[in-house]
Amino acid sequence: MTAQTFETVFDEHGDGVFAYLLRRTSRENAEDLLSETFLTFWRKYGGHRMPEEPLPFLFAIARRLLANQRRSDARRTALTERIAREPAPAPEGVPGQDTSTGLLEALAQLTEEDREVLLLDAWEQLSGAEAARVLGCREGTYRQRLRRARVRLSAVLEEAGGASPQDPGATLGGGR
Amino acid sequence: MTDLRQLLVDANPVQAAEVPDALRAKVMAEVRSTPAPRRRARFRWPLSSMLIALVAAGGVATAGGLLISQATKDRANAQTTQPEYDGGSGLPLRYGRSIELEAKRYMRQLPYPPGMRDPMDWRAYRPSSAAGEMQGTVDLLVEWRATCLWRSYWVKAYTRGDRLAAADAAEILGSTTRWPAVRADRVGDRADALRKAARAAAASDVDAVRASLQFDCDGIP
């Protein structure tokens, strides 16, 4: 990968990686981590053959950096958790603020692994193969984790009396 | 009936994001100042095959009651523990090319201060094989000398009040600890020295940068 190719990769995926980070941490951290993510990518692939689909690799780097940062600084609170306390305005034509807030509260109660599996699918809109690459597992394993995470999220929502599908098995299936 | 996945999609707090221009420029500047890494040279099968052949020959000869001279064994051992460079010929074993070619190739990848070039006579350079000397890699020496030029450039820019040039140099100095050979250097004190120099430049501590130049860069213009 030449510096020119790197620039192309940044222009194609910079916004996506930035959004991924913004969904999980503060803007200030997201800016630092975006920079570090792409520098790590450059250090790894600069001057060498680049992966055909760089996005999952970039997400994987960003995810590791986020995890490192959370470990080293427990004071930082994930965006999902903060939003659960400070409800965000609901987008037009979608379920109301209460539903989103309840959902984000429920998400915050899941393990980091369950949450990440769900969000890679719903927020990052990654295919099964791409998400599996981010998580460093097989696609089948990812799909299994996704199913289980959905069931656990549904259970948390039901317990809280929030918006839960009546039949998780039937309605949560789908996926990408 | 509510679809949980759709609910999650709708709850996405950041539907889209755009990297600010300043952040993009910062990343590009950092990448430009970080040389592309180079993969380690692959294991040299021909050399290993020779060693295997030597060992095998020794075994066969011993089995046949023949004597292998101690000198041959020593030579075989020496090949496995030889330093990266042959101090006599100056030929690097790792790259299979001359020091001059390697130095010039690597110099093309490093950023240098405007108007400054490393005048080192690489053709005449012969690395010492003594332990502790900077003979680990030519790349490390090339990087180290480039940092000296950047330190020198920073002092000159700062002294003449060129804040922009000094800021550029300080930014580059801040990236030198991430340069591949410095990062790979197991001794580690070189990275510490560069970190201190970079901090001094960022803090506009001209005396400290001058001191690092005198201490680390004696004889490097």
Image (tube, grey):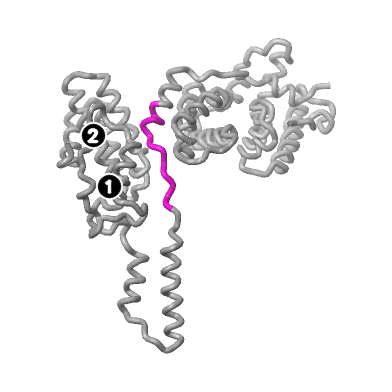
Horizontally, residue A64 falls left or right of residue A95, namely left
For the question of whether residue A24 can be seen, the reply is: no
Where disc 2 sits, the SS reads: loop
Q: Chain of mark 2?
A: B
Q: Magenta residues, as a range?
A: B29-41
* Marking on residue B55: none
Out of B153 and B191, give the one closest to the viewer: B153
Q: Position of residue B107 (x, y in %)?
A: 30, 39
Horizontally, residue B129 falls left or right of residue B36, namely left
Q: CA distance from mark 1 to mark 2?
A: 15 Å
Out of A2 and A76, give the one closest to the viewer: A2
Q: Amino acid at mark 1?
A: Glu
* Marking on residue B100: 1
Residue shown at 30%/42% (left/top)?
B104
Q: Quick check: A99 above or below A136? A: above
Q: Position of residue A84 (x, y in %)?
A: 63, 21
* Marking on residue B117: 2
Say which quarter of the image contains residue B192. Answer: top left
Q: Residue furthest bottom?
A: B65
Residue shown at 49%/34% (left/top)?
A69
Q: Amino acid at mark 2?
A: Arg
Where disc 1 sits, the SS reads: helix
